[in-house]
Image (cartoon, rainbow, N blue to C red):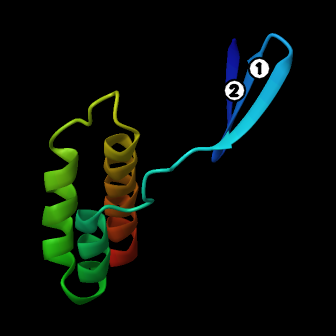
Amino acid sequence: MLSFRLGPKQLSIHKHQIHLQNIKMAPANSARIGEAQGLAKTDPRKAEDLYKEIISKPPSATSDAAVREYETALVSLGELYRDEK
């Protein structure tokens, strides 16, 4: 059997059959990311602290949601610093 991931769908090829099924995707933003993004406009220091807290612990390589949260926090912290100039 071969399996390919095509965005939110997965294609599985068995000997003579092809199956296409939906895959449940992790949410784009965690609650902590949402909170930090909301604070970025009203209290940038608190948002900075929250982003730093998130990136202080490396994500588990097996968790797509944790990796996505880490990446989003890292990029958002950079954007916060950029916008402060």
Residue tagged 1: 13
Image position, residue 42 (x, y; %):
23, 89
**In the image, what residue type sits under mark 1?**
Ile
> Can you say whether 74 is above or below 64 in the image?
below
For residue 24, say whether it is visible: yes
Residue tagged 2: 4
**In the image, what residue type sits under mark 2?**
Phe
First in residue order: circle 1 vs circle 2: 2
Image position, residue 46 (x, y; %):
13, 74
Q: Which residue of the protein is positioned furthest toward the bottom in this rendering?
A: 42
> Which residue is at the front of the view, 5 or 69?
5
> Can you say whether 22 is above or below 80 in the image?
above
> Can you say whether 50 is above or below 11 in the image?
below
Tag 1–tag 2 contact (CB < 8 Å):
yes
> Which label was assigned to residue 42?
none
Quadrant assignment, res 34: bottom left
Q: Residue at x 22, y 59 (%)?
A: 51
Mark 1 Cα-neighbour bin, 10 Å: few <14, some 14–19, many ≥20: some
Picture quarter with the N terminus? top right
